């Protein structure tokens, strides 16, 4: 049994607005912060590079997948060949996977920053170079998730106008797109891959995000208590700024957990239950998948100094 989701005009209009917000917002984040990373010689580059990586993954998901969903929603029935479906399914899973781990890395990096005893000491006016360890970790995120996406390339194929989806992963689309569907050798192997994906790739990152954010809040709390006893410590002087950064990152992670968690519950209800609420929950999952991509640039604009200045300058024109 499969399921084809009917999309109302109101849902389509709302989805188009969210996709456009995601494209414009994340492109702005990449452009503004990317320019500061290239032009600035000092300050905050590691966290900015991680934010750029996260926004870039958001942007690519919007362009490579969500815009195609809009084309499907407006009534253009396009169908790909088997080779194109294998390529596209692999890319969709790859980009969504990178999106998850890039967000987790931002949270973990901020926790590590808060736990430093003091900021790095050096010549502040010396030319800055890209940190090798950071770039290696980001490259590893992209490479490992590319490996994870290989089954999506192998076990997918092209359907037709009557094709319906019988298995869904949070990382991929919630309905046949361009006629592309999963094609596992058996239902058991498909469910095995979906279960492995849910545990290792989808559930564990959310749990780790929750722990890293709780760790960041606890670290800030302990730093605040030390301010009266050691007022001149370098790490203590940074507490107000780090608290502001922690609030922004906490808001991002909470938004991600709400969005991603809703998708996990809804999609796996379809995979394992398929009761009367399956179609409704898949509609919810569809919008949950785009909420974080669309709204994360707005959260960043509130807390990031350069983004906030750019938005104010655009609004004042």
Image: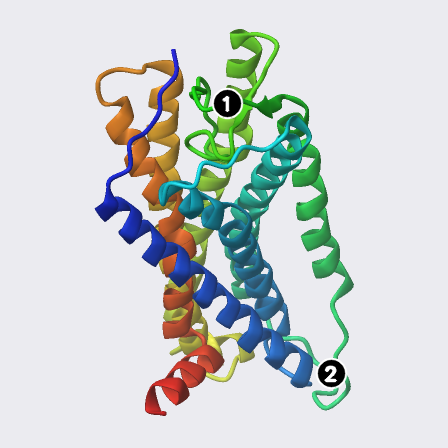
Q: Quadrant of the N terminus?
A: top left
Residue sitting at 39 percent across and 52 percent down? Answer: 292
Contact between labelled residues 2 and 1, with CB atoms less than 8 Å apart: no
Q: Label 2's element? A: loop
Q: Is residue 11 visible?
A: yes
* Residue at mark 1 to residue at mark 2: CA–CA distance: 62 Å
Q: Quadrant of residue 86?
A: top right
Residue where numbered disc 1 is placed: 160
**Circle nearer the N terminus (1, 2):** 2
In depth, the one of 78 and 188 nearer the eye is 78
Does dot 1 land on a helix, a strand or a loop? loop
**Nearer-the-camera pick, 113 or 294:** 294
Q: Residues within 10 Å of mark 1 (few under 14, many from 20)?
A: some
Residue 253 visible in the current orientation? no
Tell me: residue 246, above or below residue 195: below
Q: Position of residue 241 (x, y in %)?
A: 44, 77
Residue depicted at 68% across the width and 79% down the height? 38
Find residue 251 and report its horizontal and vertical position in percent: 35, 59
Residue shown at 41%/80% (left/top)?
Answer: 308
* Towards the viewer: 221 or 19: 19
Q: Residue 282, located in which quarter of the rendered image?
A: top left
Q: In the picture shown, does residue 161 fall above or below 201?
A: above
Up the image or down, 172 lies above or below 221; here it is above
* 101 and 68: which is toward the camera: 68
Q: Pointer 2: what residue?
A: 122
């Amino acid at each position: 049994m499969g399921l084809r989701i009917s999309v109302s005009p109101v849902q389509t209009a709302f989805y188009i607005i969210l996709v456009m917000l995601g494209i414009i917002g994340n492109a702005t984040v990449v452009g503004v912060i990317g320019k500061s990373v290239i032009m600035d010689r000092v300050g905050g580059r590691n966290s900015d590079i991680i934010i750029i990586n996260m926004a870039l993954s958001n942007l690519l998901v919007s362009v490579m997948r969500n815009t195609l969903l809009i084309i499907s929603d407006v009534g253009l029935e396009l169908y790909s060949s088997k080779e194109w479906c294998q390529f596209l399914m692999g890319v969709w899973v790859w980009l969504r996977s990178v999106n998850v781990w890039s967000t987790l890395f931002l949270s973990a990096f901020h926790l590590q920053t808060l736990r430093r005893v003091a900021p790095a000491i050096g010549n502040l006016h010396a030319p800055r170079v890209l940190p090798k360890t950071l770039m290696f970790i980001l490259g590893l995120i992209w490479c490992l998730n590319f490996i994870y996406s290989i089954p999506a390339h192998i076990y997918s194929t092209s359907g037709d106008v009557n094709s319906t989806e019988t298995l869904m992963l949070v990382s991929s689309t919630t309905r046949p797109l361009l006629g592309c569907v999963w094609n596992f050798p058996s239902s058991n192997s498909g469910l095995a891959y979906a279960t492995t994906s849910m545990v290792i790739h989808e559930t564990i990152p959310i749990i780790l995000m929750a722990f890293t954010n709780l760790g960041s809040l606890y670290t800030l709390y302990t730093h605040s208590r030390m301010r009266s006893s050691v007022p001149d410590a370098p790490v203590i002087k940074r507490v107000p700024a780090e608290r502001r950064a922690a609030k922004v990152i906490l808001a991002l992670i909470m938004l991600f957990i709400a969005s991603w968690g809703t998708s996990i519950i809804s999609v796996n209800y379809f995979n394992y239950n398929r009761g009367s609420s399956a179609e409704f929950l898949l509609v919810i999952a569809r919008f949950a998948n785009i909420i974080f991509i669309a709204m994360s640039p707005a959260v960043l604009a509130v807390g990031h100094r350069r983004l906030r200045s750019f938005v104010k300058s655009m609004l004042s024109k």
